[in-house]
Amino acid sequence: MALEVKPADRVSISLGDDGVAQVRLIRSDKMNALDPDMFAALIDAGRVLHDLKGLRAVVLSGEGRSFCAGLDMGSMANTARHDRVPLTERTHGNANHAQQVALQWRKLPVPVIAAVHGVCFGGGLQIASGADIRVVDPAARMAVMELKWGLVPDMAGYALWKGVVRDDVLRELTYTNREFSGAEAKELGFATYVDANPVTRATAIAADIANRNPHAQRAAKRLFNRYLEVDADEILMAESVEQQALIGSKNQVEAVMSQLEKRPATFVDP
């Protein structure tokens, strides 16, 4: 099943029969750099995916030589400042437009796996950081790039890196803009796996996820999205609420029976 997201020259979405959506940045002539149209297309993609029936998992990647080279500085410089919505305005719940581009992958109800290759700088790194899991090519080039341009990371990077990247490491990388390789990314906290074929590895992970109870997957993601921000009492209650809804449900029973009968499970999508 193929879906189109406008503007079509920036992002593509295809949904497989297994419920895995392949989402690709397709501005390959510019290494998928972020211009206003790319921002808009990514937001549109997030809206489509959020309500997409049959969706079980997402693989996020970039076509061509790179995942995403970050901001297209030439394009953004040509956008008059008075035409922009103030960054302090919350246009998407707790986020502004730019933050939503990266944070929306965390907000999606299903797991997201980013497959990173080539250049992944600045805003591109923040978008990849929005995924639940990141598979990075060892030859990838990565950097927290914003201070090079006299700016700070502001596409939800600080929120997404919390608890993932060690504080002193993140400070050094932010202050210096030091480039690091995909091979280093796992040790630094920016990668889950390092693999020379990141899309293939990410797709395999997504396919495995798609074979699990989709209600349980979504419940687990809701818990992950809260557990770093709330106290022990609140997360303990949240666990109990989610589990109470799952126990004895049609999909939970099917998960058990398929394991006992050693057969593929047939789940009902949320």
Image (spheres, helix red, strand yellow):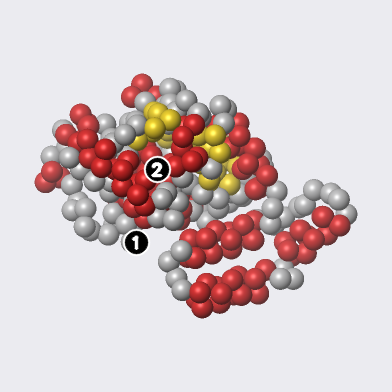
Query: Which residue: 40% across, 29% down?
Result: 141
Query: Which residue: 53% across, 37% down?
Result: 135
Q: Which residue is mark 1?
A: 93
Does the rendering let one see residue 44?
no
Q: Nearer the viewer, mark 2 or mark 1?
A: 2
Residue 124 left/right relative to 268:
left
Q: Which mark is residue 127?
A: 2
Q: Between residue 98 and residue 150, name the one nearer to us.
A: 150
* Quadrant in which the N terminus is drawn: top right
Does the rendering let one see residue 107?
yes
From this view, report whether residue 131 is shown above or below residue 176. Answer: below
* Residue 149 pos. (x, y %): 19, 36
Residue 194 left/right relative to 19:
left
Query: Which residue: 36% across, 21% down?
Result: 29
- Which numbered disc flags the more N-terminal residue, 2 or 1? 1
Q: Between residue 51 and residue 257, name the one nearer to us.
A: 257
Query: Which residue: 36% across, 52% down?
Result: 167
Q: As drawn, which residue projects farthest toward the right?
A: 261
Q: CB of mark 2 within 8 Å of CB of mark 1? A: no
Q: Label 1: state its secondary structure.
A: loop
Task: Calculate the distance from the C-alpha at mark 2 to the C-alpha at mark 1.
Answer: 18 Å
Q: Label 2: state its secondary structure.
A: helix
* Residue 188 pos. (x, y %): 44, 42
* Residue 45 pos. (x, y %): 43, 44
